[in-house]
Image (cartoon, grey):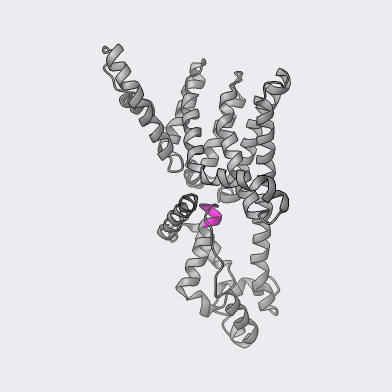
Amino acid sequence: MGGGEGEDPQKLKRIAAAAYDYDNDSRWADYWSNILIPPHLASRNDVVDHYKRKFYQRYIDPDLVVEAMATSSSSQSTTTSNPPQQSSSSTANPSDTRQRSSGSSGRTSGASTTPPTNSTSLRWDQHTIQFSVNAWVFVVAVLAIFPLVPRNLSNRAYRLSFLGTACSSLYSLYSLYGKPRAWNLQAVQVWFQSVVVTKDFMYSIYCLTFVSSHLVLKFALLPIMCRALEHVAKFLRRNFSRSTIYRKYLEDACIWVESNTTTLSILSSQAEIGLGWQRNIIQTFMYWQLLKLMYHAPATASYHRSAWSNIGRIANPLIQRYAPFLNTPMATVKKWWLR
């Protein structure tokens, strides 16, 4: 059963990657122009689709698994065995023009293999940093909720957990989306519209909300602990699956986390909704605006709508039985808050 649950998300992600509108995304044109491949391969649909999936993985959904392209070995042998053909087509290929301007036109095959290696090592560094920060956040959050820890140390660990998650989310946003193309209103607005619906943006606002609050709500650590646990488990399974220590002590826990990501997401959404009732009216209003965003954003909408449906099924019969004068269904209240 766990294997079926693991395959379905990837199938949906591949469908979403195939349906993505690459032509209207200016980043795709820049990404494609920086790929150095022979012209006869650049015209093949399977090659283009492969790099579209890699683009989607890098900029849209890092969790998409992109398999290796079977034609990579044949393309390398073609470039090394036919250097005259490569040089004769360099005038028509914009990526080769960029290669000549950088002073490496005499080594076509060497230059064609260097950029993918650099980009892979860059992604590896980003994943390593994210793993380190999220592992640290999880340990500090556990320290914050542990009952035997002194109160002053627990409160400090509580705030450090939110600060670490905020830094991790902002770093992830910068890694995936960079910064606006220009510092004018239109460019910033386009960049913000692509960022505001992401999970990382919502978690950064979530963490900054509780860091700025004087209240210490240990229950608020539950969503960021679930987030940190998912990141750590994915990194360990992808990079330490052959380690003896991982197989002996961590494999079962990581498999359980990856098999129950939906459960963790539902638990996080219920905790986020439960935290919407605070003492400070201003912070409550600001937090409900964040809940409104979570209710409509594609990354979190399904979990929050499911949680609201469960609340309505429980609250509506009680209201109709014990307080019929409040003839306002929970769904109406919810829509009024989230419209």
Q: Is residue 61 magenta?
A: yes
Front residue of this view, candidates 39 and 220:
220
Quadrant housing residue 294: top left
Please tell me whether residue 143 is drawn above or below residue 33 in the rendered image: above
Where residue 217 sits: x, y (%)?
Answer: 58, 21
265 to the left or right of 247: left
290 to the left or right of 127: left
Q: Count of labels shown?
A: 0
217 to the left or right of 189: right
Where residue 200 sits: x, y (%)?
Answer: 55, 41
Is residue 339 visible in the rendered structure shown here?
Answer: no
Q: Is residue 116 magenta?
A: no
Where residue 23 sits: x, y (%)?
Answer: 43, 61
Front residue of this view, candidates 122 and 262:
262
Q: What residue sits 45% from the left and 26% below the top?
A: 288
Please tell me whether residue 143 is drawn above or below residue 24 in the rendered image: above
Q: What residue sits 63% from the left and 31% below the top?
A: 162
Please tell me whether residue 20 is drawn above or below residue 115 in the rendered image: above
Q: What residue sits 67% from the left and 51% below the top?
A: 247
Where residue 202 sits: x, y (%)?
Answer: 52, 36
Is residue 65 visible in the rendered structure shown here?
Answer: yes
Please tell me whether residue 307 is drawn above or below residue 155 in the rendered image: below
Dividing the image into 4 quarters, which one contains the C terminus? top left
Numbered range of the magenta stretch = 57-63
Q: What residue sits 58% from the left and 74% below the top?
A: 72
